[in-house]
Amino acid sequence: MDTATLLSQSSNQLSKALQELSSGSSITSPADNSAGLAVSMNLVAQEDDNTAASNNIADAVSFNQTQDGYLTQVTSALDRMSELAVQSQDVTLSSSDLSLNQQEFSTLAAYVNNVSTEDFNGVSLFNGTNLTVTVGSSTADTFTMNGIDLTGTTFTSLKTASVATATGAAAALGTVQTAISQIGIDSASLGSNEETLNNYSGQLATLNNNLAAANSQIVDVNVASESTAYAKENILVQTGTAMLAQANALPENALKLIENA
């Protein structure tokens, strides 16, 4: 094989080693490893799908946490309403005192019912609808979050409850206690939702780490071996260039010798 051909081959290998080192990838064109490239593309697609599912889960967790924050405030309101219902059964209270209690009780009841109309990015937080979350790349990978309903009679009846009389206060206390019990059930459901979603999120993170590691084995360049290859081909190119230059100079030198003879 002549010097020019060897120089051309070394130059090509030098260029390839440089591309791999600069890109960090051992596959700089489909010709490098067509089968490996196909596998890598599938792995990357799975990673992207899992990342999208992780984002879905994160949004669903935020939805749950928003619900939980509102329910904490509703619980506080109901606790005060319960206190007012007990207080209004005090026989020493005047009608003026009872009227003030009723005013506060009604304000708190209105607050609880207003919370039932709140939404998260246009999606109702408390209309009782179950929401299905995609938690994986397969269409079968879903989780249904139990809906929280603040629109039912358990909560709407608070608006008509009255603590303006001792008798009414006794009935109102039962209504409030029923609502408090339901909030406890709803809060437990939210906790279960969030726990399950976090489990799915951890599962996806583990899967994506393994997919990334598998893809790395295919596409990541071996810096040590490619650096060695680069140094080798660089020496060969420099040597070949020098030899080719010397070979090209031989006819000219021979001609000069003839002319000077």
Image (spheres, helix red, strand yellow):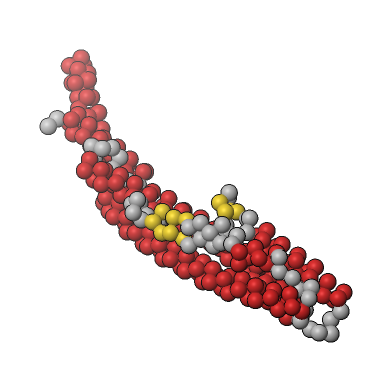
Please identify the quarter of the rendering in which residue 166 is found: bottom right
Judging depth in this view, the residue of 126 and 179 nearest the camera is 179
Q: Position of residue 46 (x, y in %)?
A: 33, 50
List the single residue furthest toward the front.
167
Identify the residue shown where x is 47% and y is 69%.
Answer: 192
Tell me if 218 is positioned left or right of 180 in this view: left
Q: Position of residue 38 (x, y in %)?
A: 25, 43
Report the quarter where the C terminus lies: top left
| Numbered label tally | 0
Residue 33 visible to an observer of this rendering: no
Identify the residue shown where x is 63% and y is 55%.
Answer: 117
Identify the residue shown where x is 58% and y is 70%.
Answer: 183
Judging depth in this view, the residue of 216 and 145 nearest the camera is 145
Looking at the picture, does residue 81 appear above or below residue 248? below
Looking at the picture, does residue 249 appear above or below residue 195? above
Looking at the picture, does residue 3 appear above or below residue 52? above
Residue 244 visible to an observer of this rendering: yes
Tell me if 73 is positioned left or right of 166 in this view: left
Please identify the quarter of the rendering in which residue 236 is found: top left
Q: Position of residue 251 (x, y in %)?
A: 19, 21
Report the quarter where the N terminus lies: top left
Judging depth in this view, the residue of 45 and 152 nearest the camera is 152
Identify the residue shown where x is 79% and y is 70%.
Answer: 102
Judging depth in this view, the residue of 167 and 100 nearest the camera is 167
Q: Position of residue 39 (x, y in %)?
A: 25, 46
List the single residue furthest toward the top.
259
